[in-house]
């Protein structure tokens, strides 16, 4: 059987969270839970050893319980080697898998492959072929210079790194005080001998910076619908553009039916209610107000909740007037308010064949959709 040491000792300083990045939100879960779930799904783990700072222990215990794992803990050391050594003291199985908690996308299959290689050959280290050329450098007259460059035969080491427990313990025991290694494959190769390579996964990325978390932002669809009645003596405003017509739309605000449907789509994507809730038509503050101004307020609400529009589309249902000529200005206006480029705003127009409320020119209706991204920061 195999024990897993998952190194979670970082403080998240480089990621700039002010707390352990493995507890940060990652699409509704945390890197720690995602990582632990993969290990559990691999079906080869006997004991989970979490190496972390004392202050994070309670949080990791709670998150581990959510994925059905009851780990044991070791105190994180000053260095990676110190942390792994503390974990090794608790290992009971013949094979040990050492993994970086900051690689949450590891697959159960890769975990099994590494464990199997270690059980068979004494070691199994995940690595992927280098796609960029690796340069050897040195300092020369105060400058960094390249002494050789090559990609042939070069791999980039990942984790898991699995070893025979006995061999990796021996490697640590023979390590001299001056030696430092960035991972256990280096230590093993230097002190025991050839280390077996297991083909890793490009998706097994390490989360280092805050931007790495943003990459995995989730997308949320939103939908909104609105209809306003056409009346003589009112202005017709769509997407903030005034359109000359014999009738205009009736409403408490400027009755910009297009902007209203878009606001509802945005709010619905973030589950923030609807415009009736936020801007009630009984509130005198909103009488005659420009709906583009209200759209700005909706954008602030989304921003506070971590949502950003990726694109917005809407179909305007109007029998008259012909709107096609105004679409470029409407898109330009909306794109600026939504802080996205114009090609991300799609506006289509249709008549309703002379039937129904719209067809009889009694009103204009709009159906809008949006896609918003929620950053995992
Ligand atoms: Mg409305």
Image (tube, rainbow, N blue to C red):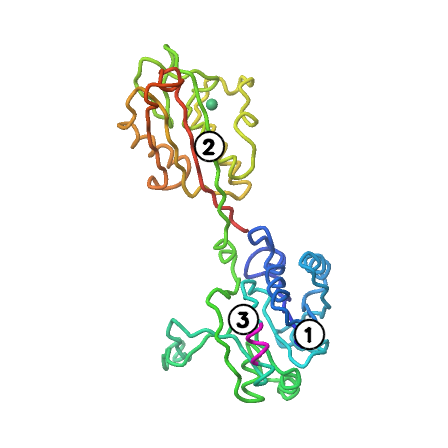
What is the quadrant of residue 120 in the picture? bottom right
| Vertical relation: 341 (above or below) 197 | above
Give the residue drawn at x 70%, y 77%. 91
Report whether 16 appears left or right of 318. Answer: right
What is the quadrant of residue 274 in the picture? top right
Q: Mark 2 to mark 3: distance in Å?
A: 47 Å
Q: Mark 1 to mark 3: distance in Å?
A: 21 Å
Circle 3 sits in a helix, a strand or a loop, which is it?
A: helix
Give the residue drawn at x 57%, y 64%. 102
Expressed as whole percent of the image width and height from the top left, the position of residue 195 reads 53, 84
Closest to the observer, 360 or 188: 360
Expressed as whole percent of the image width and height from the top left, the position of residue 251 reads 46, 17
How crowded is the residue under tag 2: few (<14 C-alpha within 10 Å), some, or many (20+)? Answer: some
Question: Which segment is the magenta one?
Answer: 112-117
| Vertical relation: 142 (above or below) 19 | below
Nearer to us of marks 2 and 3 is: 3
Report whether 31 appears left or right of 134. Answer: right
Closest to the observer, 283 or 97: 97
Report whether 116 appears left or right of 51. Answer: left
Point out which mark residue 110 bears: 3
Point out which mark residue 87 bears: 1
Give the residue drawn at x 64%, y 65%. 40
Circle 1 sits in a helix, a strand or a loop, which is it?
A: helix
Image quarter (top left, top right, bottom left or bottom right) of the N terminus = bottom right
> Are the two marked residues, 2 and 3, in contact with CB atoms closer than 8 angstroms?
no
């Amino acid at each position: 059987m195999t024990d897993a040491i998952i190194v979670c000792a970082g403080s998240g300083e480089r990621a700039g969270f002010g707390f352990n990045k493995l507890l940060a939100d990652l699409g509704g879960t945390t890197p720690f839970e995602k990582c632990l779930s993969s290990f559990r799904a691999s079906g080869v783990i006997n004991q989970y050893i979490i190496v972390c700072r004392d202050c994070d222990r309670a949080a990791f215990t709670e998150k581990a319980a959510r994925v059905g794992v009851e780990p044991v803990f070791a105190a994180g050391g000053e260095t990676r080697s110190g942390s792994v050594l503390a974990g090794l003291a608790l290992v009971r199985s013949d094979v040990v898998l050492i993994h970086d908690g900051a690689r949450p996308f590891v697959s159960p299959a890769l975990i099994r492959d590494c464990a199997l290689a270690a059980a068979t050959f004494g070691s199994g280290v995940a690595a992927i072929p280098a796609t960029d050329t690796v340069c050897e450098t040195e300092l020369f007259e105060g400058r960094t210079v390249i002494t050789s460059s090559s990609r042939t035969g070069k791999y980039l080491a990942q984790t898991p790194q699995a070893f025979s427990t006995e061999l990796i313990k021996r490697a640590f025991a023979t390590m001299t005080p001056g030696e430092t290694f960035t991972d256990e494959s280096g230590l093993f190769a230097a002190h025991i001998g050839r280390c077996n390579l297991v083909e890793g996964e490009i998706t097994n990325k390490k989360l280092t910076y805050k931007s790495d978390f943003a990459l995995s932002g989730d997308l949320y669809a939103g939908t909104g619908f609105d209809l306003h009645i056409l009346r003589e003596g009112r202005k017709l405003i769509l997407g903030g553009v005034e359109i000359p017509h014999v009738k205009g739309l009736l409403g408490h605000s400027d009755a910009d039916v297009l902007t209203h449907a878009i606001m509802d789509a945005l709010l619905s994507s973030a589950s923030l209610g609807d415009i009736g809730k936020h801007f009630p038509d009984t509130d005198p503050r909103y009488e005659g107000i420009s709906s583009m101004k209200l759209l700005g307020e909706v954008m602030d609400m989304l921003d506070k909740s971590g949502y950003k529009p990726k694109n917005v589309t809407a179909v305007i249902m109007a029998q008259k007037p012909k709107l096609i000529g105004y679409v470029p200005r409407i898109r330009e206006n909306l794109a600026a308010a939504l802080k996205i480029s114009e090609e991300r705003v799609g506006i289509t127009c249709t008549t309703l064949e002379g039937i129904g409320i719209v067809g009889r020119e009694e009103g204009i209706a709009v159906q809008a959709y949006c896609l918003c991204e929620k950053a995992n920061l």
